[in-house]
Amino acid sequence: MATDSTKPSVLIFGGLNTCSRGLAAFLVPLEGEALVSHLRIVDKYSVHPPTTYIGHEFTKVLEKPEVEYRQANLTVAAAIQSAFDPPEGKAAFDYVFDFTGEVRYDRSELIQINTTFGVARLLGLEAAQRKVKAYVRIQHPFYETSSKTAALEKDDIKPAETLGIWWHETLRMQASIQDLNLVILRIGFVYGPYTNFGNITSAITVASVYGYLQRPMKSLWGPGKNPTHSVHVDDVAGAAWACAKWMESHGRKAADDLAGEAILFHNDKSRVKEVEGMLPHEEKPVAPLFNLVDDAKSTLASTGQTISACFGTTFEFFNMVEVTLIRLKDDLEDINEHHVEGWTEMLMNSNPPITNTPLNPYMDKYTLEKHVVAFNNSKIKNIVGYKLLHPDFNQADIKEIVDKWKAEGVWPNAQNPSS
Ligand SMILES: *[C@@H]1O[C@H](CO)[C@@H](O)[C@H](O)[C@H]1NC(C)=O
Ligand SMILES: *[C@@H]1O[C@H](CO)[C@@H](O)[C@H](O)[C@H]1NC(C)=O
């Protein structure tokens, strides 16, 4: 039962702190049949005991006979090579899911280069040499797009911040690797059960504080068109899987013909000589690229309203005078302090009190800044035939996320004493 050689064997690299637990649960569900014969997940964290939050579901997934976890330092080429070696007596891995990359914007540029670009380069080169049938790279929404029309895959959009520049450079580098059966999946803002990173998770946590305080949640950014397209973590998993199957049936060359896009330079030209593996600015490598967002066309306002309604409060906007005052006083730290105080009170007033949780309402600079991310999702539907599992962004899904955290004992159950 544990192995079935007619099913693909799969490697997932990185992303234990982002979406790879969701993919693992999709490939080897707790109930029902596994989609894979073998799954090896490789990341820098330990899972026994966990050195990062892994959640109740993934803990169970790790117990499945098909699943193997390996802790490895992915900046080391030898560690990557050995991670690609199949288990004793088994054939080579069929699919690789590359969920690596630094998602914290506040790391130094050198760290971004090493852990985003450098790791992905070692992985891409090794996967090409091993001739894996599909290699799916997840690209997070570190871009600023137009607020007027949702970006198509062929549009040349601008990476956001140093973080985004190196994620984008990584795509150029991987696209240029000969024989790599690469598909790039460019996702929106992720949310979903056990997903404890990103802007939507922050918004859920902060909204709960306002609900508890019985006050409206207010945004620093005007209610104008401000798209922040979203995607459920189950769809990241489902679409990554669909893209792998699609790639396997076409191969890179046909896939480039069907869905290839040129990935243009958005970096500092002087870096080309300094960073090993970086392509000259004039090169225009092509790779199959698909946007993945839900159909909700989420905006800051719609997301804020849906989430705040779950906690019995409303989402409003500061008026111009208030915003100017807040910015003048550089009050962002005060805002955070206020949220963290409320959250701490909620944790302490819970029954039993919560002393350890992976969630907090602290919003870093990136989360607090205004972002415009609008992606058109028709290409993946038309070419890969992908059908969204969660086409809309709704209260029921947010409630499910919170209920799962409550069941784990990491989400407060405190009521406001005055309510
Ligand atoms: C991973 O390897 C790099 C390069 O050898 C090293 O600098 C780094 O400290 C290692 N990281 C860990 C967590 O051991
Ligand atoms: C990045 O990698 C290079 C080359 O392996 C190494 O010399 C450097 O110390 C690393 N820097 C950081 C900040 O990890």
Image: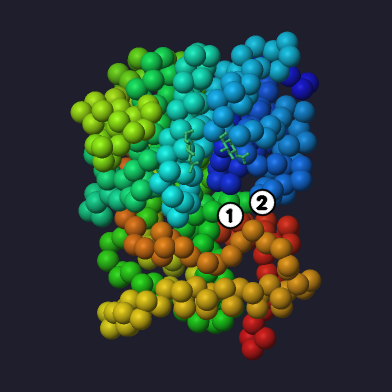
Q: Amino acid at mark 1?
A: Asn
The spot of residue 263 in percent (x, y) is 28, 32
Res 227 quadrant in image: bottom left
Q: Nearest to the eye among marks 1 and 2: give it.
A: 2
Q: Residue at x 44, y 66 (%)?
A: 304
Number of residue marks: 2
Q: Up-down: is 142 above or below 270?
A: below
* Nearer to me, 339 or 309: 339
The spot of residue 189 in percent (x, y) is 44, 51
* Secondary structure found at label 1: loop
Q: Residue furthest bottom?
A: 418
Residue 172 in sight from this viewpoint = no
Q: Residues within 10 Å of mark 2 (few under 14, many from 20)?
A: some
Q: Is residue 67 left or right of residue 182?
A: right
Residue 77 in sight from this viewpoint = yes
* Nearer to me, 255 or 354: 354
Q: Quadrant of the C terminus?
A: bottom right
The spot of residue 171 in percent (x, y) is 37, 32
Q: Quadrant of the N terminus?
A: top right
Q: Up-down: is 388 above or below 177?
A: below
Q: Amino acid at mark 2?
A: Tyr
Q: Residue at x 62, y 51 (%)?
A: 194
Q: Residue at x 71, y 63 (%)?
A: 356
Q: Residue furthest left?
A: 282
Q: Which residue is mark 1?
A: 196
* Secondary structure found at label 2: loop
Q: Which residue is mark 2?
A: 53
Q: Residue at x 45, y 55 (%)?
A: 106
Q: Is residue 396 left or right of residue 322?
A: right
* Disc 1 + disc 2, Cβ < 8 Å: yes
Q: Earlier in the sequence, mark 1 or mark 2?
A: 2
Res 406 quadrant in image: bottom right
